Image (cartoon, grey):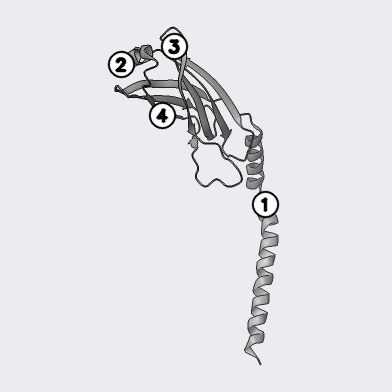
Amino acid sequence: MNPKIFVFVAVIALAAALGMILLSGSSSIGNTPENIDNKVTQETVSTQQVRPLSVELNDISILEVTERATTIEIAFKINNPNPDSVIVQVMDYQLFETGFSNEKQISGGQIGSRPEGMVEFGSNYYVLLSENSILLKDKIVLKNTGNTPELWSDLESNTAKWRVTGTVFYNLSSMTSGQENTLHFEFEK
């Protein structure tokens, strides 16, 4: 007898066995009591409300002041009160100096990034584990144009008064599940 027939029959038998396992495996495994409880738990988690994060202004520090530029570091502490992880996509903020006669916006920034399009090649977001906190920092370099001597004097003497406003954009556990949540904040220091 021809050996090619035996190989052909063996391949068909293996394909049929694999097909039977795939078709019957999902129904026999899917109806066990443990999996039914797991499905109910997952449905409950997906429909639960996301509690809002809390944001604290951890610190604003003037790291260096020269005649030409100043380096400022700003740090935020974000707390997650949820029993599940939260993805902090991006935090937008604006920094104002309020120490002299009229308030001036000094700078603004963004920590993290929002996904754009279908494919994201580099993720720049933060996973905040359940009932935990994270510290997000950013450095700001201000150039001295000579137009704001009062501001530069406050920076050199470290007597600047600050106001910070912004928004945090976050999701519960996945970029694709649930809606995007926002939290607006404002601090004075």
Residue 24: x %, y % from top left: 70, 60
Quarter of the image for residue 141 reads top left
Residue matched to label 3:
98
Between 172 and 94, the one nearer to me in the picture = 94
| Lower sequence index among marks 4 and 2 | 4
Specify few, some or many for label 2: CA neighbours under 10 Å numbering under 14, 14-19, or 20 or more: some
Residue 68: x %, y % from top left: 32, 24
Residue matched to label 1:
30
- Quadrant showing the N terminus: bottom right
The residue mark sitting in front, 2 or 1, is 2
| Lower sequence index among marks 3 and 1 | 1
| Lower sequence index among marks 2 and 1 | 1
Type of residue at label 2? Answer: Glu
Residue matched to label 4:
137
The residue mark sitting in front, 4 or 2, is 2
The residue mark sitting in front, 4 or 3, is 3
Q: Which mark is residue 177?
A: none
In the orientation shown, which residue stands out farthest toward the bottom?
A: 1
Residue drawn at (40%, 24%), measured in percent from left and top? 74
The residue mark sitting in front, 4 or 1, is 4
Say whether marks 4 and 3 touch (CB < 8 Å): no
| Lower sequence index among marks 4 and 1 | 1
Tell me the element at label 4: strand
Residue 76: x %, y % from top left: 44, 25
The residue mark sitting in front, 3 or 1, is 3
Kindly report the distance in space between the C-alpha atoms of the residues bearing marks 4 and 3.
Answer: 21 Å
Q: Is residue 117 above or below residue 128?
A: below
Kindly report the distance in space between the C-alpha atoms of the residues bearing marks 4 and 2.
Answer: 22 Å
Tell me the element at label 2: helix
